[in-house]
Image: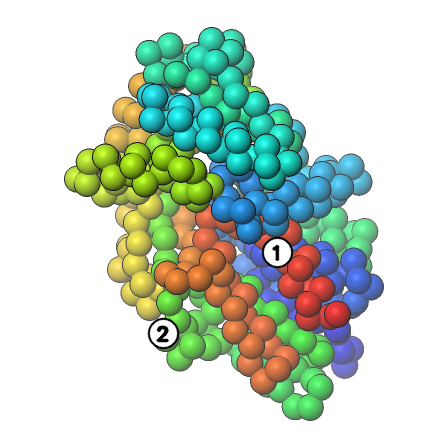
């Protein structure tokens, strides 16, 4: 039986980039995905890579991720487009936060450019003049097509980096004896590795239910929509709006943050449903719109249910119509996804018997932070 240097459980973005960095070190890697292809948060998101929205720790990791994504794209098409990100302010308070963040970015040596309202309207077709007061643009940031990116990254790892990939293989148990971990899958097969990384979202409860029950993990359910292809209207990049400015961690480091948040109404539907409005146009011309957030302790994740709330989608559509005049608002599809995050820390990590490392709960930072975080984590494990 072949023994791998490392086995990764979970083929989403966090698991895939741990495999990538292990392979970069010349290690042999087996990656196990319980489905035919990843089905979770990695494919149910905008595909926005936005270090600009992260706190300073995760901005550094996100900027490292940008370099990694771009380097892969130069070798293999993973659907990356570098059209930048913009935050659009709807009032003077939000514009002040943008100005303050621009100053922080200058100190961090992270390129950003303040835009006037007119520059924003010129750059983004259909942006309403009665909404936008100005913007902050980040030229280095990128977009991916979430339904393509992870599949192409895994293809690249298999074809060019020698990844041993095992789809449709759920790991039911892991045993440790000496320097060997034995992974038992639900088909009756066994695989050996020196170390194991468990990166399977909040669903690591299958392997370690007691740890899962005692963790501070929170399951977060999001709703998103895709609008039909716009006949001729095009706007590039990641578009984040005033509600995003009021939500994202980066802005909490701005001097005016506390006073802006204190003045917000406590009972708004946006606050109740955790709504902030993002836009991203796909290569076909359709528009991804969202999103909302509902929360439950990971142990009660099933309480979030599988229904889509039409009232929440209606709120998002109405708020979006205040921002853009689109050529069509026909809804092409609706969906929900769940990711996990921690109440008290920025990512969940635990080590079992010195050789099994659980890494999950990266929250909404997954597409942006996973590549950079995994680089540092693999370097620590295999110093």
Name the secondary structure under disc 1. Answer: helix
Picture coordinates of residue 238, whole percent (x, y): 52, 29
Q: Closer to the camera, 117 or 168? A: 117
Q: Which residue is most to the bottom?
A: 178
Crowding at dot 1, Cα within 10 Å, few <14 / some 14-19 / many 20+, comes out as: many
Q: Closer to the camera, 358 or 151? A: 358
| Mark closer to the observer (1, 2) | 1
Quadrant where the C terminus is found in the figure: bottom right
Label at residue 213: 2
Residue at coordinates 55% horizontally, 51% vertically from top-left?
A: 57
Asked whether the viewer can see residue 288, the reply is no
Crowding at dot 2, Cα within 10 Å, few <14 / some 14-19 / many 20+, comes out as: some
In the image, taking residue 67 as reference, residue 211 lies left or right, namely: left
Picture coordinates of residue 58, whole percent (x, y): 55, 49
Q: Is residue 183 above or below residue 50?
A: below
Name the secondary structure under disc 2. Answer: helix
In the image, taking residue 17 as reference, residue 5 lies left or right, namely: right
- Closer to the chain start, of discs 1 and 2, is 2
Asked whether the viewer can see residue 378, the reply is yes
Label at residue 373: 1
Picture coordinates of residue 322, whole percent (x, y): 31, 19
Q: Is residue 347 above or below residue 288?
A: below
Q: Is residue 208 above or below residue 23?
A: below
Q: How many marks?
A: 2
Residue at coordinates 66% horizontally, 82% vertically from top-left?
A: 181
């Amino acid at each position: 039986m072949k023994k791998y240097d490392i086995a990764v459980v979970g083929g989403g973005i966090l698991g895939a980039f741990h495999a990538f960095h292990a392979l970069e070190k010349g290690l042999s890697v087996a990656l196990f995905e319980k489905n035919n292809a990843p089905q979770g948060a990695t494919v149910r998101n905008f595909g926005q890579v936005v270090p600009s929205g992260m706190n300073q720790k995760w901005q550094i990791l996100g900027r490292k991720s940008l370099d990694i994504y771009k380097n892969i794209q130069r070798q293999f098409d993973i659907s990356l487009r570098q059209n930048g990100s913009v935050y659009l302010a709807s009032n003077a308070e939000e514009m002040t936060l943008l100005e303050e963040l621009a100053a922080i970015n200058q100190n961090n040596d992270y390129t950003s450019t303040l835009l006037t309202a007119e520059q924003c309207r010129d750059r983004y077709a259909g942006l309403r003049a009665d909404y936008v007061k100005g913007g902050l643009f980040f030229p280095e940031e990128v977009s991916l097509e979430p339904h393509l990116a992870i599949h192409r990254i895994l293809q690249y790892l298999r074809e060019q980096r020698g990844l041993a990939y095992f789809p449709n293989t759920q790991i039911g148990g892991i045993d440790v004896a000496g320097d060997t971990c034995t992974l038992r899958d639900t088909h009756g097969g066994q695989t050996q590795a020196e170390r194991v990384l468990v990166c399977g979202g909040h669903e690591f409860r299958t392997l370690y239910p007691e740890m899962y029950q005692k963790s501070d993990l929170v399951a977060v359910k999001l709703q998103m929509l895709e609008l039909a292809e716009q006949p001729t209207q095009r706007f590039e990049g990641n578009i984040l709006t005033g509600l995003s400015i009021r939500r994202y961690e980066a802005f909490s480091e701005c001097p005016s943050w506390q006073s802006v948040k204190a003045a917000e109404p406590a009972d708004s539907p946006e606050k109740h449903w955790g709504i902030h409005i993002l836009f991203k146009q796909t290569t076909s011309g359709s528009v991804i719109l969202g999103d909302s957030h509902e929360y439950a302790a990971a142990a009660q994740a099933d309480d979030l249910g599988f229904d889509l709330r039409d009232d929440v989608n209606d709120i998002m559509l109405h708020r979006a119509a205040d921002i853009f005049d689109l050529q069509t608002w026909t809804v092409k599809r609706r969906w929900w996804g769940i990711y996990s995050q921690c109440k008290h820390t920025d990512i969940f990590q635990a080590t079992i018997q010195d050789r099994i490392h659980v890494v999950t709960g990266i929250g909404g930072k997954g597409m942006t932070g996973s590549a950079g975080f995994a680089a540092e984590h693999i370097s620590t494990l295999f110093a």
